[in-house]
Every structure is written in structure tokens, then in C-alpha cells.
Image (cartoon, grey):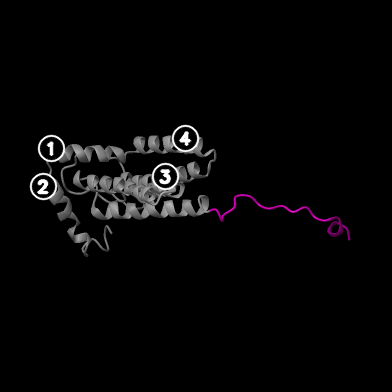
Amino acid sequence: MTKVLSKDWPFTIEDAVNRDFAAARTGDWNGVTGFFSLVGSTPVIIGVAVLAAVVLRLRLHRWRESIFLCLAVAAQAVVFFFTTLAIDRARPAVPKMDVSPPTSSFPSGHTSAAVALYAGLALVLSLLLKRAWLKAACWLLILVPVAVAVSRLYRGMHHPSDVTASFVNGAVCVTIAARALLDRTVTWTKSFHRASPMSSTS
């Protein structure tokens, strides 16, 4: 991405996308994107995840959904951290609207965290609610990470491929965590059967 494919499509048009966003900045959109960039920030993600986990635990009287949500968010953070260590990519060559953290541009931590949290929350709510229209409405939460991703592009903090990879990161972490924790066919404990007197003697 940074060397081998940097001169191939679609990476050759990424700079143009960032320049177009920078040229289209307005006061109103600056405020909107600033809000959604904040929504994807680490303190807000952690706060919302903890609050949602506590509410789920108190309402459902079990840990399964709460642990799932926290695991999905934590897993994407681990993947993000080690990916930034392996891939050193400069941020877009446009004026930045936010302070650049000391990490690689690839991938977008804001976006992957928002995908893990809000897609995970949408999945949990869709499994808990009974009415079909409410189940469908839960998936509107996916619009939050989409707004976060567009905001990070608009504010000059990431390339399009950065946020695209972050959607993959968040979605994979949610899928794996859901398979491990929300799938009722997966048991967490082993079954122990007491041996009969006949089998214990020889």
C-alpha cells in the first residue's frame, strides 16, 4: 500500500479525494464532522461501551452481551495498535483539522472503534428485540461509523483506504466475538459425567 501498490488504482486517486473534501469545507460541515470525529474518539468509545455494558448487565441479569460488546471493542483496538506499528503511512497531504496522534494513518482507529461498538450494539439489540421493525431500526446504528469515517476523510486525517480497512477490522472483530459469545450453540463449560460403579472397578 505504501510502496508496491502506491502507483496503482485505486490508491492513485486517494489524494484527489482528500483534496476534494478539503476544498469543500464549510463552517456548518466543520461542526458536524467535528462532532462525529469526537464520537469516534477513544474516551467517548470507552464511555459508551462501558455504559452500554452496564445497562445490558442490569437489564438482562447476565454477562454474555456485555462481555461481547467489550471484547469486540477491545479486539479491534489491539488489531489497530499492532497494525500501526507494522505499517508506517503518512497522513493525507491536506490541511489537518484535528491534532494528529503519533500513529500511522493506516488504519483509522476512530472508524474501527465506531464499527465495533455500534455494529456490535446493533447486533445485540436486534437479537433481543421481538418486533421486526425494531430489529431493522437497530441497524441504523451502522450510520454512526459511516459518519465517523466520512468525518475523518473530510478533516484530512485519513485516506479512503484507511477507513475502508477499519470497517474490515471492526466487522471481523464483531463477527468473531459474536461467534464466541452470542452463539447459543457454543458452550462455555465442559460437561462432567460421574463414572458408574461398574466402570470404576476393574
Q: Nearer the viewer, mark 4 or mark 2?
A: 4
Q: Earlier in the sequence, mark 4 or mark 3?
A: 4
Is 170 one of the magenta-colored residues? no
Amino acid type indicated by mark 2: Ala
Q: CA distance from mark 1 to mark 3?
A: 32 Å
Q: Secondary structure at mark 4?
A: helix
Q: Earlier in the sequence, mark 2 or mark 3?
A: 2
Quarter of the image where the C terminus is located: bottom right
Q: Residue at x 41, y 55 (%)?
A: 172
Q: Residue at x 26, y 60 (%)?
A: 3
Q: Which residue is mark 4?
A: 54
Q: CA distance from mark 4 to mark 3?
A: 15 Å
Q: Which residue is mark 3?
A: 73
Q: Residue at x 63, y 50 (%)?
A: 189
Majority secondary structure in the magenta region: loop
**Which residue range is magenta in the image?**
184-202
Q: Which residue is mark 1?
A: 27
Is 197 one of the magenta-colored residues? yes
Q: CA distance from mark 1 to mark 4?
A: 37 Å
Where residue 188 appears, as percent x and y from the top left, is 60, 50
Q: Earlier in the sequence, mark 1 or mark 3?
A: 1
Tell me whether the residue at label 2 lies in contact with that at label 3, contact meaning CB atoms closer than 8 angstroms.
no
Q: CA distance from mark 2 to mark 3?
A: 33 Å
* 34 to 17, vertically: above or below: above
Q: Secondary structure at mark 2?
A: helix
Q: Nearer the viewer, residue 95 or 45?
A: 45
Q: Earlier in the sequence, mark 4 or mark 2?
A: 2
Q: Which residue is mark 2?
A: 23
Side of 51 where 151 appears, left or right: left
